[in-house]
Amino acid sequence: MAIKEAHIVLARCPQCNRHLYGIRVEKQPDHWALTWAFPIDESKAKSEGYDETVLNGTFHPSPNYNGCPFCGTKTFLHCPRCSKITCYHGESYATCAWCGLSGETKAQNNMSLKGGSM
Ligand SMILES: [Zn+2]
Ligand SMILES: [Zn+2]
């Protein structure tokens, strides 16, 4: 079995004081599969360089994905301004936990956060 390409991306949970957590993602032929989420502190994330990871494509939770370690969600908003991800619970209006951009949200699978000024 070939070793899969995997990375750690960072997300924040707005329901838990915007706490930071890491998500392990594995490359699949047509998307990135989320495989594991774990709490991480800011200085560790920075020293590991996780905050510089940039991945393009579609993200889907794998069948075993455990979800946000704080609120348990497996869905995200992807912010068009800072390109970071925030836990999402189906709200029709949401705020990016990284940069504070807020706006109406589109369909859940679309993973985008539409800001008023964009
Ligand atoms: Zn969360
Ligand atoms: Zn943002």
Image: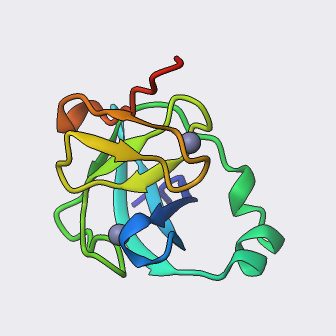
Q: Residue at x 33, y 50 (%)?
A: 76
Q: Residue at x 26, y 68 (%)?
A: 65
Task: Identify the image's colour scheme: rainbow, by chain, secondary structure or one colour.
Answer: rainbow
Q: Residue at x 51, y 29 (%)?
A: 80
Which corner quadrant holds the N terminus? bottom left
Counting from the top left corner in percent of width and height, residue 72 is at 25, 74
Vertical position of residue 113 compared to residue 2: above or below: above
Q: Quadrant of ligand 2?
A: top right
Name the residue at the top extreme. Answer: 118
Q: How many marks?
A: 0
Residue 44 located left or right of residue 104: right
Counting from the top left corner in percent of width and height, residue 20 is at 55, 72
Residue 57 located left or right of residue 70: right
Frontmost residue, 87 versus 26: 87
Counting from the top left corner in percent of width and height, residue 7 is at 57, 57
Quadrant assignment, res 109: top left
Frontmost residue, 116 versus 15: 116
Vertical position of residue 20 compared to residue 77: above or below: below
Counting from the top left corner in percent of width and height, residue 97 is at 51, 56
